[in-house]
């Protein structure tokens, strides 16, 4: 896509850079995954970087959309866009490399948003790159040379010596980063043995290449994953991913999932990642606690919100440490088990694809457990933090099946799910998207799922069950607004039926009962209640009693959904 070069670093330049970085990482993702051998050979560095930047892009686009919807002609400021970029990367950071990239972007945003300037020039970009490299290095408990930190520092050093506009500074940083990337195998023996450069550093070079394109309109070329590829000396070269890693002396072994395995590599059993709401002092104590528990510790963020990443043997202890420090959420635990990333490709036989799988987006931990028990691969959607298409693609790949049924369980996720389905179809996976608009519709679909049936028959049956389930939710109004049931005030209890506000009340149980009566007036055989963590059991008992007394032959089933956003989800089949 042709781009108009940006003269200064303003809000539009932030938006352009994020978009180009996402495109570049999308092209390079598989190559970066394949050369990922440090700190563990889990073959997901490219994917994690892509998902991190995708979250940053979504946050920046939301800021521009918000200003476009306003009454004034002014667009977002540089500070608005830079802070959104950093916040989006922070909440969406994946893996060790994604977490470090989030801190790099945060460091840049701290400079770009300082004193709320209209734009930044070459000098501002130099300062931003230096702050990015320094803050990322401080965020890592035990910095290791030959990694993305080395590449970031080299980019900042090269930028320090450049004089001129943003394009000149960006190109100097890019060239410095490429030279440092080519030297990483000489700094890390694990890279030298595998015959590759550092995967995280390779991803950062791609991001810096997008920065060059933002300010010059030219795409760079000449970055590859093998250790034998050095930087191009052509100042006008274009940056594009190579076709794939080129092993040196046959040292790189390809695992079944494309991850590069290094013989003899050992490490902790689990990767633990979570967002944490905590004060600075508590985070300092948390760093010490986690550093004693494991390795690859990276804690990034600030202003009360942090992203914590660590590799440990005791995942429970890592989470408990977060609970002691503040409020952890969006907790992700990945098992580096035997026969997985710590074994060689020869030791791990290719895993056979399942014939069929169900991938579902769920709004709370309780429902995630329920769906998982039913055999589904789940993607957790936190309130206000919907999953991106890349996260759904990753879940489909994780399901490792020839046929996949995708349940978005949210009307607003239909287009995101459709984009994910389209992408994985290009990888040879047969995907059917059932447009479920609520998790209770997904429960109904999953209840009739039969993997032994023909795919089309199974999809039709699941679609029919979801479509026959009316859905409702009980929630609390955040602000005054007009609704189909009248004007609500902040704090009112709202009952929504099939997505529209139908009841405005002041009591959760009474509002839920009114909603339930309206839904059952059209008939029904089964009522599903999913309680949020703030709703007492007495509400469910009250509603169960109401169904039992007022509606003969109607069964009720109750689940705990956890932190699911809505106070209560209701389904009527």
Image (cartoon, rainbow, N blue to C red):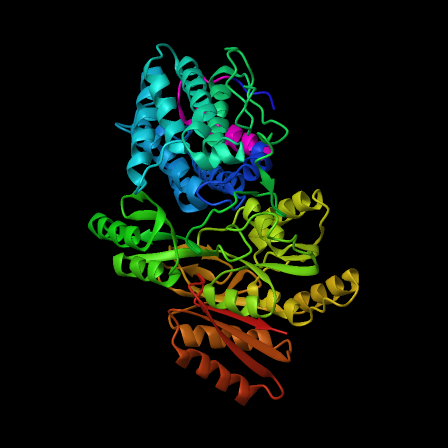
> Looking at the picture, how far across and down is residue 357, in whole percent?
66, 60
> Looking at the picture, how far across and down is residue 133, in whole percent?
33, 29
Q: Which residue lies at the image location 32% right of the left edge and 32% below the top edge?
A: 107
Front residue (pair 316, 430): 316
> Looking at the picture, how far across and down is residue 220, in whole percent?
54, 19
Whether 480 is drawn above or below 88: the answer is: below
- The answer to whether one can see residue 88 in this image is no
Q: As drawn, is 449 to the left or to the right of 568?
A: right
> Looking at the picture, how far across and down is residue 297, in whole percent?
34, 46
Q: Which residue lies at the image location 55% right of the left edge and 28% below the top edge?
A: 226
Instruction: Look at the image and say whether residue 567 sits in the magenta stretch.
Output: no
Q: As drawn, is 86 to the left or to the right of 289?
A: right
Q: Which residue lies at the image location 48% right of the left edge and 19% below the top edge?
A: 212
Q: In which quadrant will I find the C terminus? A: bottom right
Front residue (pair 380, 94): 94
- The answer to whether one can see residue 233 in this image is yes
Q: Give the range drawn in magenta.
A: 5-27
């Amino acid at each position: 896509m042709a781009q108009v070069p940006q003269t200064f670093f303003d809000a539009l330049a932030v938006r352009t850079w994020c978009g180009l970085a996402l495109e570049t990482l999308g092209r390079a993702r598989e190559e970066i995954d394949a050369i990922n051998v440090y700190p563990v050979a889990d073959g997901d560095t490219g994917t994690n970087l892509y998902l991190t930047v995708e979250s940053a892009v979504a946050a920046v686009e939301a800021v521009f959309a918000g200003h476009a919807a306003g009454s004034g002609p002014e667009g977002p400021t540089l500070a608005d866009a830079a802070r959104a970029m950093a916040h989006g990367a922070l909440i969406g950071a994946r893996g060790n490399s994604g977490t470090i990239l989030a801190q790099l972007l945060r460091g840049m945003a701290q400079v770009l948003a300082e004193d709320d300037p209209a734009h930044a020039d070459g000098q501002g970009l130099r300062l931003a790159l230096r702050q990015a490299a320094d803050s990322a290095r401080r965020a890592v408990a035990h910095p290791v040379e030959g990694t993305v930190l080395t590449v970031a520092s080299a980019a900042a050093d090269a930028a320090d010596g450049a004089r001129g506009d943003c394009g000149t500074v960006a190109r100097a940083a890019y060239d410095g980063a490429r030279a440092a990337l080519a030297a990483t195998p000489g700094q890390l023996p694990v890279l030298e043995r595998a015959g590759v450069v550092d995967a995280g550093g390779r991803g950062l070079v791609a991001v810096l290449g997008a920065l060059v394109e933002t300010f010059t309109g030219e795409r760079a070329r000449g970055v590859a994953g093998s250790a034998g590829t050095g930087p191009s000396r052509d100042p006008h070269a274009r940056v594009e991913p190579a076709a794939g890693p080129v092993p040196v002396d046959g040292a790189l072994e390809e695992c079944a999932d494309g991850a590069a395995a290094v013989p003899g590599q050992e490490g902790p059993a689990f990767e633990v990642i979570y967002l944490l709401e905590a004060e600075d002092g508590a985070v300092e104590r948390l760093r010490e606690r986690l550093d004693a528990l494991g390795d690859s510790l990276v804690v990034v963020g600030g202003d009360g919100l942090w992203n914590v990443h660590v590799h440990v043997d005791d995942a429970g202890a890592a989470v408990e440490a977060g609970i002691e420090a503040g409020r952890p959420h969006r907790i992700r635990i990945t098992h580096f088990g035997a026969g997985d990333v710590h074994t060689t490709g020869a030791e791990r036989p290719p895993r056979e694809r399942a014939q069929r799988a169900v991938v579902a987006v769920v709004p709370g931990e309780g429902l995630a457990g329920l769906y998982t028990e039913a055999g589904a691969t789940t993607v957790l959607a936190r309130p206000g933090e919907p999953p991106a298409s890349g996260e759904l693609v990753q879940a489909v790949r994780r399901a490792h099946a020839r046929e996949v049924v995708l349940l978005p369980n949210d009307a607003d996720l239909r287009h995101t799910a459709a984009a994910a389905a389209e992408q994985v179809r290009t990888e040879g996976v047969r995907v059917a998207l059932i447009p479920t608009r609520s998790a209770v519709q997904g429960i109904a679909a999953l209840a009739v799922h039969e993997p032994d049936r023909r795919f089309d028959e199974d999809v039709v049956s699941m679609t029919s069950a979801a479509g026959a389930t009316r859905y409702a939710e009980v929630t609390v109004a955040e602000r005054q607004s007009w609704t189909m049931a009248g004007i609500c005030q902040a704090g009112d209890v709202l009952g929504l039926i099939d997505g529209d506000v139908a009841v405005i009340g002041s009591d959760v149980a009474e509002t839920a009962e009114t909603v339930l009566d309206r839904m059952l007036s059209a008939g029904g055989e089964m009522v599903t209640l999913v309680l949020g963590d703030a709703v007492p059991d007495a509400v469910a008992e009250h509603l169960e009693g109401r169904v039992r007394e007022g509606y003969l032959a109607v069964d009720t089933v109750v689940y705990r959904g956890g932190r699911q956003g809505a106070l209560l989800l209701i389904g009527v089949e």
